[in-house]
Image (tube, rainbow, N blue to C red):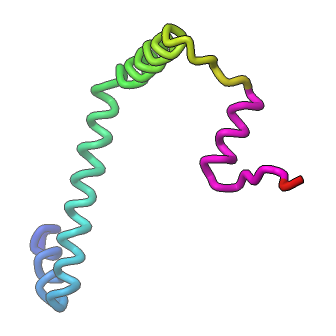
């Protein structure tokens, strides 16, 4: 008995809900394989991100909006997370 026949025989012995899980798992493996192939074929994605970030920074600087220092970044991060509370004094 070859692998394909063995797999089909075992799959047929499962209840329908588990058969669907097997199908879902096989689809997941196909996506994983496709994703891995794409990553090898497209190593240019990181430089594209860097270029976009540099362009965005230039736009911010040109708009005269001041860039945040590290303290400002930390404060904004805390505010966005809802953790910042001004002193009530």
* Left or right for 43, reference 26: right
Residue lying at 29% horizontally and 42% vertically, measured from the top left: 35
Give the x, y percent position of residue 50: 46, 18
Give the x, y percent position of residue 9: 12, 82
Q: 8 above or below 51?
A: below
Q: 1 above or below 46?
A: below
Q: 62 above or below 39?
A: above
The total of numbered circles placed on residues is 0
Residue lying at 69% horizontally and 47% vertically, measured from the top left: 78
* Left or right for 85, reference 23: right
In reply to whether residue 89 is colored magenta, the answer given is no
Toward which corner of the image does residue 11 lie, by quadrant? bottom left
The secondary structure that dominates the magenta segment is helix
**Who is closer to the viewer here, 16 or 63?**
63
Q: Identify the image quadrant of the N terminus.
A: bottom left
In reply to whether residue 74 is colored magenta, the answer given is yes
Residue lying at 50% horizontally and 8% vertically, measured from the top left: 62
Residues in magenta? 70-87
- Residue lying at the far front of the rendered structure: 89
């Amino acid at each position: 008995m070859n692998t394909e026949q063995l797999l089909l025989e075992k799959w047929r012995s499962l209840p329908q809900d588990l058969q669907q899980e097997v199908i879902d798992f096989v689809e997941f493996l196909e996506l994983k394989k496709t994703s891995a192939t794409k990553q090898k074929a497209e190593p240019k994605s990181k430089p594209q991100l860097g270029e976009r970030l540099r362009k965005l920074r230039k736009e911010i600087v040109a708009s005269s909006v001041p860039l945040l220092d590290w303290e400002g970044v930390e404060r904004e991060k805390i505010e966005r997370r809802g953790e910042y509370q001004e002193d009530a004094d």
